[in-house]
Image (cartoon, coloured by chain):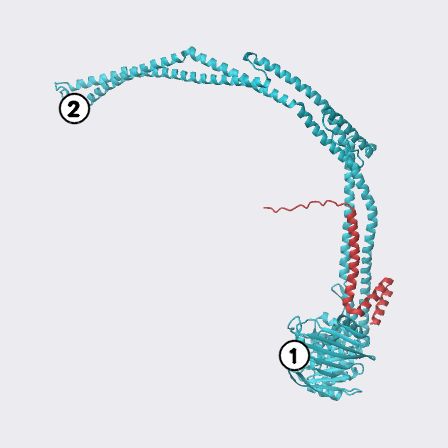
Chain colours: A cyan, B red
Amino acid sequence: MESLEIEGFRGINQRLTFKLDRPIVFFFGKNGFGKSSVLGAIEWCLFGNLAYIVNPESRMQDEIVNIFNLEGKARVKLVMVFGNKRYEFTRVKNIGKRNTKFTITSPDGEFQDKQAENKCFTLLNITFDDFYRAVYLHQESVRGLLIDKPAIRDETMDRLFGLERLRNILKAIPIRDVRDAVKKLQTKRDRIGERIKGASEKVENDYRKNLENARELGLKEENISFEFGSKKVKSIIDRLGEIAGQYDINLLKFSVPTSVEDLNKGSIRAKKFMNECRKTIISDSGVGDTTAKKIRLIELMEKYSKNEEGIKDAKKRLSEIETKYGDKIKIEKFIGGIKAKIDKLEEKRKNINVRQRVINDAIDYFEKITENSCPVCGSAIDGKKILEKLKSQIEKLKTKTIDEIDKENEKLEKQKKELEDASSDFLTIKGELDTLKIKKENQIQSISELIGKTLEKAENLTEIVSREIKKLDADIKKFEDAHKSREEEFQRIEGDIDIVKAIHKVLTKKQEYEGIKTLMASDVEGMKTLRDEIKKLNLFEDMLTQLMKAMTSAQINLADEEIKKTSPNISKYYGILCNHPYFRGIRIDVQSKKAGGKVKNSYFIKAFNPTERKDTAVSARFSTGQMNCVALSIYMSLSTVLSHKLGFLILDDSSQSLDTEHKYSLVEILNKVVSDNQLLISTQDTEFQKILKSQLSSKEKKCIYTFENWDKKGPSIKFAE
Amino acid sequence: MAHLKEIVKEELEKNDNSKETLSLCEEIFDWYDEDGPKLIKTNIQKRIKEIKSQVNRDIRIIKEKSPAVKKKAKKRKRKKK
């Protein structure tokens, strides 16, 4: 790095420029004075991201921009030198806008935005993830090496071993998408194959069925042809023409079949015409009317006969009444006589009743009163004797006279009723007879109208009607005979139409079947192409799988190699930095692990006692300070392995949890690293600052930026060499 | 980065992989160098899409030529009352 210019970024408001062209650059100062903002500016300028914003305010990432900056803009410019070439990386972000403007000015020209991102990657050969885990050593990432989730720890280790590219490539290969695509295409191919097969089987079945039907109609194999069908159609047309001529019907226009489809059209037209002929012939022949007339005549005659019987019966009943009782006048007369008698009897009974009442009253009197004098004239009487006499008289009255009257009355009433019934019947029968006679007249009239003759005498009616019916029967028979022979011809024609239809069906299906066979032949070609295309994808999948396998194998082999290579350094740095009283050494074990369908490296950092051969996972038994030492030893020894082109390391508060002894040890290690890398070290630890100043040596002078204060303008910085 | 590519290629050659596989290996590393992991995913998915499109075109042509087959009506299960 050569220089860094920051304005409006995080804790920095007004523009600050830092010279970074020394092997060691210190950033000293208390917490919150902007040291991490300066280091973060490098990260953000190169990658447009900051690894550790704990609670972002919004998607816009406006927390990047200094809250007091009047322009509302954050701008960072980093100048780096690669070989002899000078590159300026500039990134700008405005408040309220998510995207940043990134520019690289280089000897090759100016690159902007997407092109600049690409150029950056080409130049640095490092991604953002790689950067914040292996170049910019945040305390969080240092400790994360030991206590973060295994997946994250493994990623970190891969990066430290320079295997992050392989890991990135393996992660990026969408093998699952390829496999899914192959599966889906294979399923589609199978389905289309089934579909074609199904279609051809269906058509073949239909063809055979139609052939069977045609044979059942008596068609021979050699006659199932267009020529034969065509001849049949012509014959049908000719015969229909004859019939049409006989009955003076207009024949439909028929064209000679020129194709298989025309056979069907011709047969349909023929059938239609034939049905119309039937209707026309029947309606024009008048046979319908004749038949209807006959039926009506028969109906009328039946009614007439029934009527005649009714008249006969009524006359007979009338005659019976007259024979028994006489005619109507006589019957009325008799009824009158009986009524008079009944009245007389009624009168007689009334009189008897009065007498009876008087005697009953007298009986009552004499029963109640014991006087012996007459209640009327006052003469002396024997009451008891009179009472006895009265009682015997009343008995006589009851038993003899009244009974006789009642019997006589009953007899007369019976006679009267009989005569009245007879009279009523007489009237009813007379009424019926009159009605029947009127009906008869009407029936004769209807029959006359029907047969077209005036019938004078009813006695000849049956004979006349019978003759008429015979005549009608003769007409009907004549028509039926003609119809029979004509219908036979129609049926023959229908049979031929069925044959033509059958031929049409067989030929159509045969065409279809042959079409499908041709199609299948070309489909074989089509399916072959399909298979070849899918095979290409299959092959692609295989190649990717082989590639991934090779990368995984290379990954584990390289990790093994790097571990072997760096183990001495790791152990050395661990020895210097941590100096654990029991676990004297640390080692890194690596295994292959399958996760998410891909094989990755899985690392286990263990501390061990070489003498007693006991080991432990560092995260299980070490203190925070000790874990820090382990992490730092690994980072420092492995950071030299990274194959990026940055050539610098940033350490931010790396002395956390270290005691004085360990701080000295850390500086001892940094002394070894500084020969290969530029170091940017930030700390608020005053003790560590002193140790760094005094103990960390380099060929060129160090530069020290001391952050003394902070206000709205930004940090106040003192520069020293 | 170059050496990683060589190591992977050696591994592939050890397992008798084809020239096409070796060539794909080169391509993938080149894509990574050009624009990182994103470009690898994009280009592979592009290749899948190309083949899929071609296959779908072939299927469409075959379907157009072949007659349709009536599907059997699905039997609807009636709920028991």
Query: Which image quarter is the C terminus of chain A in?
Result: bottom right
The residue tagged 2 is A369
Above or below, A223 relative to A584: above
> In the figure, is residue A165 to the left or right of A295?
right
Q: For mark 1, does the 10 Å Cα neighbourhood hold few (<14), some (14 to 19), or many (20 or more) residues?
A: few
* Residues at marks 1 and 2, CA–CA distance in whole angstroms: 153 Å
Depth check: give the residue in front, A172 or A65.
A65
User: Please, what secondary structure does the residue beneath circle 1 have?
Assistant: loop
Is there one chain holding both mark 1 and mark 2? yes
Three-letter amino acid code of the residue under disc 1: Leu
Above or below, A606 relative to A260: below
At a point 75% along the width and 35% down the height, the residue shown is A265
Chain letter for the residue marked with disc 2 in the picture? A
How far across and how far down the image is residue A707, in percent? 68, 85
How far across and how far down the image is residue A378, in percent? 12, 20
The residue tagged 1 is A70
Three-letter amino acid code of the residue under disc 2: Ile
Q: Quadrant of residue A474?
A: top right
How far across and how far down the image is residue A456, in percent? 55, 13
> In the figure, is residue A247 to the left or right of A362?
right
Mark 1 vs 2, N-terminal side: 1
